[in-house]
Image: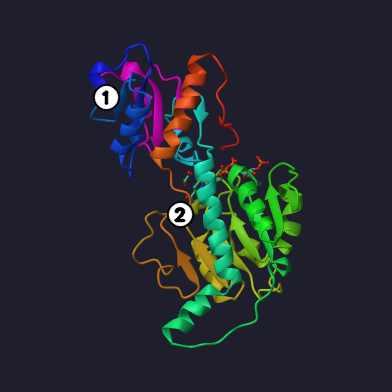
Amino acid sequence: MPGSANPHAGAVAIVVSGWDAEAWAQRFRTLAPSRPIRIWPHQIERADEIAYACAWRAPHGSLAEFMNLKAIFSLGAGVDHLLADRLLPAVPIVRIVDPDLTARMVEYVVLHVLIIHRHQRLYDAQQRQRLWRDHDQPSASEVSVGVMGLGHLGSAAAQALRGLGFQVQGWSRTPKSISGVACHSGADGLDAFLAASEILVVLLPHTPATEGMINLALLRKLKHDGALGGAHLINSGRGLLQVDSDILAALDQNLLASATLDVFPQEPLAQESPFWQHPRVTVTPHNAATSDPRFLVRNVLTQIERLERGEPLENTIDRALGY
Ligand code: NAP
Ligand code: GLV
């Protein structure tokens, strides 16, 4: 009940669009019953009491209303939705790094790599034709997967794939060392990384440096003569990393054998998009790693409590880098 909340605990505003704000607010109220929790816009009576904004695709300018803000929490791993707001207050931005979110993304990547590796789409089609036919199956140890972005999500996915026996490459901005994973970095390391990758898994953030990276020129550089007989793309990073028309061109030119896309430059994906019906495209509705308030609110409260004890916030982002 907002009326019985402790007036000394910094108030939290939930500012989301496209998500159920009430589910987040209820979880906050359950875990922090003495803290005022307000859903933007209808429960904000005094903008000056809001110390923390918990945001997902907040309408631009909405967080600027809070003149006493101490921190902004992205309710997902990505922060591009915040940084696109030119009126964003100049306070620390914390993002979600949480075992639940990571596990969900690892499940998504492993699922779709295995669908490709085990020719599952072919067997689905055969089943519809009542066709009993086995096909050559390479060993995972013959198949090379490249993970673009070796952050919290990419490195966990790379390690899970390695655990299944795949050859795994990774690429990041700065050098990394992950046991069993051939790590490449920076512009100088990109071509060698791509040349070794027959399944490309994209887990980069969307920043000015990464926008539009997944284009025809890059897809040409993938490994096309590997054990799977073609190159495959899985993008569960961000839609604005990819150039949709280039992905379609790459499929047409057999530079891509398949594309698995969880994210798109425009979401929801337009009804007229050719991706929906393309026989070699798998579309999922940006749900590779859904933010679930049952698991993630504890994570946000931990950071708020750290700040209120005078301890440094964890998982803050670098605004200049954009992630
Ligand atoms: P993270 O920990 O910040 O990792 C980002 C990785 O990308 C790092 O390895 C970073 O390199 C690398 N990177 C950034 N800019 C680069 C550049 N210009 N060149 C090369 N590498 C670059 O992020 P995360 O938690 O793993 O999340 C990654 C992204 O996944 C999020 O930003 C979000 O867009 C996406 N995501 C999608 C969903 C979904 O449901 N589809 C869910 C959650 C997250 P360094 O290691 O050198 O810094
Ligand atoms: C989801 O897309 C996220 O950034 O967590």
Percent of width and height locating residue 240: 50, 52
- Span shown in magenta: 45-73
Q: Could you say whether the residue bearing mark 1 is in a helix, strand or loop?
A: loop
Percent of width and height locating residue 101: 50, 44
Q: Which residue is mark 1?
A: 44
Specify the quadrant that holds the N terminus: top left
Quadrant in the picture for residue 27: top left
Percent of width and height locating residue 167: 72, 61
Q: Residue at x 49, y 26 (%)?
A: 302
Let me know if residue 237 appears in the view. no
Q: Residue at x 32, y 14 (%)?
A: 6
Mark before the other along the chain sequence, 1 or 2: 1
Viewed as shown, does residue 83 lie left or right of 164? left
Whether residue 2 appears in magenta in the rendering, the answer is no
Viewed as shown, does residue 161 lie left or right of 184? left
Of the pair 268 and 106, the residue shown nearer to us: 106
Quadrant in the picture for residue 162: bottom right
Q: Residue at x 33, y 41 (%)?
A: 17
Q: Amino acid at mark 2?
A: Pro
Viewed as shown, does residue 236 lie left or right of 24? right
